[in-house]
Image: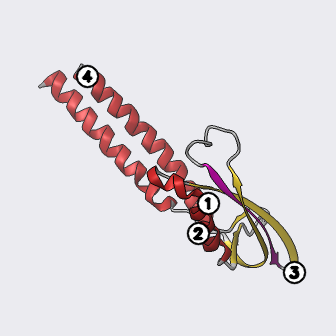
Amino acid sequence: MNYFIAIFVFAIGVGAIYKGRRVKAVLKRIKKFQIASLQTLTLNIVDARLSHNNIRFPKTLESTYTFLVGGQLYNGNTVYDINFTGAEKAFTTKIAEIEKMKIKDANTVWYDPVNPSENFLKKTSLPVLAVLPFVGWIMCVVSLVYLLVQIFG
């Protein structure tokens, strides 16, 4: 039975390494994004679309904006899922309004200099996920050491 747990931990570790490497690639790409000044911004709070996210994210914030790069005007739109937990569900509209005000204060757009149509208003907290490969390697090593001790020890 303990062998199965060790193999399971090893498999999770391999998955963490794989996912973490993909996150690192995205972070590396986003670091190359440049900043442009926001020209126009429209924000709308809407009920979440009927999907698997409907329970967890009862409201979404849809943003439509324009920005100027090299004398050319570009359009962008981003949909932000607003996360609610526990008792906060009673305040969904109020929390959505607070999130709307946070984004409304934004005056910059991050865009890909190679393809400005790839852009966003709000940076997310992906750096926390950058430790996934490290955690994955630890899980793999620990599970392999455990298996070796059980087999040869």
The residue under the point 71% across, 44% down is: 49
Residue named by callout 3:
71
Q: Position of residue 138 (x, y in %)?
A: 30, 45
Residue named by callout 2:
98
Toward the left, the furthest residue is: 153
Assign a secondary structure to mark 1: helix
Give the mark nearer the N terminus: 4 vs 3: 4
Q: Most prominent secondary structure in the magenta stretch?
A: strand
Label 2–label 4 contact, CB within 8 A? no
Give the mark nearer the N terminus: 3 vs 1: 3
Mark 3 surroundings within 10 Å by alpha-carbon count, few (fewer than 14), some (14 through 19), many (20 or more): few
Residue named by callout 4:
3
Query: Which residue type does callout 3 highlight?
Result: Gly
Query: Which residue type does callout 1 highlight?
Result: Thr
Q: Nearer the viewer, residue 104 or 141?
A: 104
Label 1–label 4 contact, CB within 8 A? no
Q: Does the magenta segment cover residue 63?
A: yes
Query: Which residue type does callout 2 highlight?
Result: Ile
Which of the two marks, 1 or 4, is nearer to us in this view?
Answer: 1
Compute the Cα span from label 4 to label 3: 63 Å
* Region in magenta: 58-69
Assign a secondary structure to mark 2: helix
Q: Is residue 85 above or below residue 151?
A: below
Query: Which residue type does callout 4 highlight?
Result: Tyr
Give the mark nearer the N terminus: 1 vs 2: 1
